Image (cartoon, grey):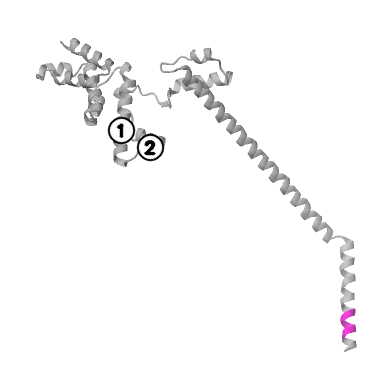
């Protein structure tokens, strides 16, 4: 009986007929013994979670996902349901669509439960071990050919995703190199300007302290005194 029910749930789930899947789940027996057996079946629980999501019953969805340890094969789909449900709730509260930063904050506030997550951190679409491998490949060849991209061993890696990763990494490296060059130019120009100002200051001080400048100053003072004396005599 449980295996037959699970088979029907899997078939309806694959067909995408959520309405029919929901009707089938409602038709299942409600006897305690039967419910206890079905509530331990992953296919039935996954189907209930999918129906709960599509009917907007997010509380039931969260309860199902948080209270049953699902196999790794179900993680991707259930993680998508978990995140999308929280996104929709946040959009309803805020009254507007969520941007990338909003979604990031929602993911931080409502992390994936360990029942649908293997505990390994993901950045964008790759797990950390895959990103480490990609970084090693990038150091060897920043421009891999399509065959190398497809050869990257990962459980959720595709050639397009790998190509995008390499493209983004090259852009970041070029931007960082340009920023470093600009900083070096600014520092170099600042050093030249500072040296020029110091040389100018030294030149002015040297000119003021020279013998010619002293004689010129002394020669100017008597002229002023004589003029003043003459002026007094005239009066």
Which of the 4 quarters of the picture holds residue 20? top left
Residue picked out by circle 1:
86
Question: Residue 235, how many percent across, how many down?
Answer: 87, 89
Q: Neighbour class for label 1 at 10 Å: few (<14), some, many (≥20)?
A: some
Question: Residue 42, how many percent across, how many down?
Answer: 24, 17
Mark 1 and mark 2 lie on one chain; the one further toward the N terminus is 1
Furthest residue toward bottom? 235
Residue picked out by circle 2:
102
Quadrant location, the N terminus: top left
Question: Residue 17, how many percent across, how many down?
Answer: 24, 19
Which of the 4 quarters of the picture holds residue 55? top left
Q: Is residue 193 above or below residue 65?
A: below
Residue occupying the point 49% across, 22% down: 132
Toward the viewer: 54 or 224?
Answer: 54
Which residues fall within the magenta stretch? 226-231
**Left/right of residue 1 with respect to residue 158 in the rendered view:** left
**Left/right of residue 73 with respect to residue 191 in the rendered view:** left
Residue occupying the point 23% across, 20% down: 47
Mark 2, secondary structure of its residue: helix
Q: Is residue 123 above or below residue 192?
A: above
Q: Which mark is residue 191?
A: none
Residue occupying the point 45% across, 17% down: 158
Q: Main secondary structure of the magenta part?
A: helix
Q: Is residue 160 above or below residue 104?
A: above
The reply to whether the C-beta atoms of the residues labelled 1 and 2 are less than 8 Å apart is no
**Left/right of residue 103 with respect to residue 229 in the rendered view:** left
Mark 1, secondary structure of its residue: helix
- Residue 92 in the magenta stretch? The answer is no
The Cα–Cα distance between marks 1 and 2, rounded to whole angstroms, is 11 Å
Residue occupying the point 58% across, 19% down: 143
Question: Residue 59, how many percent across, how many down?
Answer: 22, 31
């Amino acid at each position: 009986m449980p295996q037959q029910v699970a088979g029907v749930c899997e078939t309806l789930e694959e067909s995408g007929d959520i309405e029919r899947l929901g009707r089938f789940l409602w038709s299942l027996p409600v006897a305690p013994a039967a419910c206890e057996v079905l509530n331990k079946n992953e296919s039935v629980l996954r189907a209930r979670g999918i129906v709960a999501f599509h009917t907007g019953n997010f509380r039931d969805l969260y309860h199902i996902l948080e209270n049953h340890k699902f196999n790794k094969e179900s993680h991707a789909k259930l993680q998508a349901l978990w995140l999308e449900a929280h996104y929709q709730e946040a959009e309803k509260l805020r009254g507007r669509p969520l941007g990338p930063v909003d979604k990031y904050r929602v993911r931080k506030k409502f992390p994936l439960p360990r029942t649908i997550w293997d505990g390994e951190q993901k950045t964008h679409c790759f797990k950390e071990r895959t990103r480490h491998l990609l970084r090693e490949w990038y150091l060897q060849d920043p421009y891999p050919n399509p065959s190398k991209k497809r050869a990257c061993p990962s459980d959720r890696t595709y050639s397009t995703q790998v190509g995008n990763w390499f493209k983004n990494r090259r852009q970041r490296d070029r931007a960082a190199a340009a920023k470093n060059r600009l900083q070096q130019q600014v520092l170099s120009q600042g050093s030249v300007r500072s040296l020029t100002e110091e040389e100018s200051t030294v030149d002015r001080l040297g000119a003021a302290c020279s013998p010619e400048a002293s004689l010129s100053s002394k020669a100017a003072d008597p002229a002023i005194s004589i003029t003043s004396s003459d002026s007094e005599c005239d009066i």
